[in-house]
Amino acid sequence: MKHAPFCQRPNYCQQLSCQQLRAQASSQSRAGHYNLATLWLFRKLWLQSGKGHDYLAYLLFRRALGYPLSANKANILQRFIALWPRRIWHKLYGHRLRQCRNLLAEHQHDSGGAVTTAAVPRRYQRQVRHWRSEQHRWHTQFSQYLQQAGSVVLVGNSPTLNGSLLGTAIDAADIVIRFNQFHSEHTQYCDSGRKCNVWVMAPDFRGQAPSAVQWCLVSGPDMVWQQQRWPQCCTRPDMQLLSIGLVHWRKLVRQLAAPPSAGLLTAQYIASILGYSVLHNNSRQNEAQPKSVLQLAGFGHTTASGQYHYAAPAHQAVSRHNWLAEHQLLQQWRQLHNDRTEQNSGP
């Protein structure tokens, strides 16, 4: 699927009904067209309908591009949900009301306010509030943890691992980072290794968390402020859950004009901590020496069989990602850091 540039101009002269705008905006968003033209559709829909649920859809897509609420937008949203008859009229109840409250809670925290009760089911509220309140401290500790390591390996779930015999080299790293389900009856330890120090979880992943892992990264746009339950993490009080900040998500969205994959987003986040040039098209050659060696293994899914996932062969690639642009960014990364990255695991 071809993605238009992020800054593509919308068709301002297009005359559409609210129903047509709503259908087109939702379709573009679901297809992964994260650009200003799609944002314009959501905004035009809200201005044309005046409905609170359309305003919420506009704010949610705006945040999906990496932009949190401004003070003015927070005030407008607050007025929509202030009185219950107004909520009913504007269809802001149930799940939508929880989304409104989470957006406002994030804005209050970003503005220096206290962490409020999370808009999640009651049995998860205490845990989610704890996660939110500890993010700054845990990010500081996690950065120190990575920077003190001599080597870090980020291991994707690409089938290029099959037959690679990289297992020993991967396990020799000081810190190994893996994603979602990374072992199964289809994997071989001689290819992918056993070690896992940091686990990256997709927001919709429902499998169990690996045992004895201290750190969990949740991929996506700072997902700890969205409505998530993650029961597999609630049962692990010893595991520290980190949400990747919007700044990393926003930079990649502007380059890809699509939601970045968990692998690319995590690579960007880890690279920024370790002092590497981030995955941008304008990376400079005269960067400072990184604090630790970062290697990539198991990235790319182009194989003769068409398989996408190493541990789950039936799993299919998500079409809304801009895979071509991601491939180009990773190729640039390997060329720029060819003396520090794994050369046998490229896309």
Image: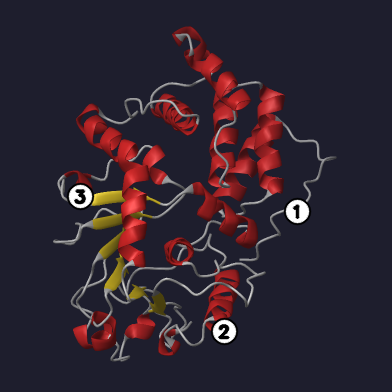
- Return the disc, 2 or 1, that comes first in the chain's sequence: 1
User: CA separation, marks 2 and 3?
Assistant: 38 Å
Amino acid type of the residue tagged 3 in the rendering: Gln
Q: Could you say where residue 201 lies in the image, as x and y percent from the top left?
A: 32, 57
Instruction: Give the residue displayed 31% in from the left and 53% down from the top.
Output: 141
- Return the disc, 2 or 3, that comes first in the chain's sequence: 3
User: CA separation, marks 1 and 3?
Assistant: 40 Å
Instruction: Give the residue displayed 46% in from the left and 78% down from the top.
Output: 300
- Return the disc, 1 or 3, that comes first in the chain's sequence: 1
**Residue 242: which numbered mark, if any?**
none
Q: Residues within 10 Å of mark 3 (few under 14, many from 20)?
A: few
Helix, strand or loop under label 1: loop
Instruction: Give the residue displayed 65% in from the left and 70% down from the top.
Output: 281
Amino acid type of the residue tagged 1 in the rendering: Gln
Q: Could you say where residue 70 lies in the image, as x and y percent from the top left?
A: 59, 30
Amino acid type of the residue tagged 2 in the rendering: Gln
Among the 4 quarters of the image, the one containing residue 98:
top left
Instruction: Give the residue displayed 28% in from the left and 55% down from the top.
Output: 216
Q: Depth-wise, is mark 2 or mark 3 nearer the camera?
A: 2
Residue labelled with disc 3? 232
Among the 4 quarters of the image, the one containing residue 73:
top right
Q: Is residue 265 above or below residue 340?
A: above
Q: Could you say where residue 122 lies in the image, as x and y percent from the top left?
A: 23, 27
**Residue 335: which numbered mark, if any?**
2
Residue labelled with disc 1? 8
